[in-house]
Amino acid sequence: MPALTRRRSTDAHRDIWNVYYGDVRVGAIGGRAGVPVHVDQWVWSCGFSSGLNPGQHQDGSAATFERARAAFEEAWQRLLPKIPEGAFAEYRRDRAWRAEVAAARERGEKLPSEVPISMMRCVCGVKFDSHRPDESLPHRRHIYAAQSSDGTPR
């Protein structure tokens, strides 16, 4: 069973520690910004997306980092047995997919769902490319004829 580890966030404006269970980020502990000095100065959140059920995430605040860390670890010990089998694998699959999408975007590529498909199937059963006039003209006639015979507007 992996141990919890903390890694300082790259956010230069706030003091934030990301908490990991193996390679999965399961929460964070951070200094609160813009709050009065007489309230808790640290906040923590425990849980992760893609694998947990709604309402399983936990969070809270504490006066010191040490108390926030202790509260986080207590919440994690309560949460860990309730995490469904496969949740970490689901998280990793989602993380890998998001990385692939980000890499494609970085290369300027479109996702398969963003590429228009011009292939159509005619009422006569032939598959054709609607962007090629030489292929599509005879099939347009078939399609229009079929629409007018069944009462559908042309």
Image (tube, rainbow, N blue to C red):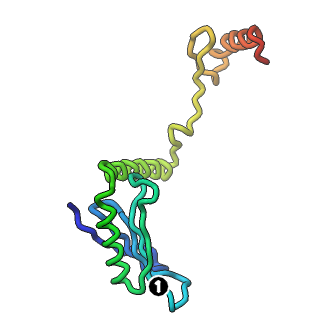
39, 25: nearer the viewer: 39
Examine the image and state in which quarter residue 18 appears: bottom left
**Residue 42 at x, y = what percent?**
44, 81
**Residue 121 at x, y = what percent?**
59, 17
Camera sees residue 77: yes
**Residue 153 at x, y = what percent?**
79, 18
For image coordinates 28% across by 70% down, the residue present is: 5
Total residue callouts: 1
Camera sees residue 154: no
For image coordinates 51% across by 91% down, the residue present is: 37
* SS for callout 1: loop
Against 18, residue 24 (above or below) is above
14, 55: nearer the viewer: 55
Query: Which residue is under mark 1?
Result: 40
Against 85, residue 59 (above or below) is below
Q: What is the quadrant of the N terminus in the image?
A: bottom left
Q: What is the quadrant of the C terminus in the image?
A: top right
Instruction: Mark 1: give few (<14), some (14-19) or many (20+) Cα within 10 Å.
Output: some
Against 21, residue 14 (above or below) is below
123, 77: nearer the viewer: 77
Amino acid type of disc 1?
Asp
**Residue 103 at x, y = what percent?**
44, 51
For image coordinates 55% across by 89% down, the residue present is: 36
For image coordinates 63% across by 11% down, the residue present is: 123
Furthest toward the left, the residue is 1
- Whether residue 130 sits left or right of residue 91 in the image: it is right
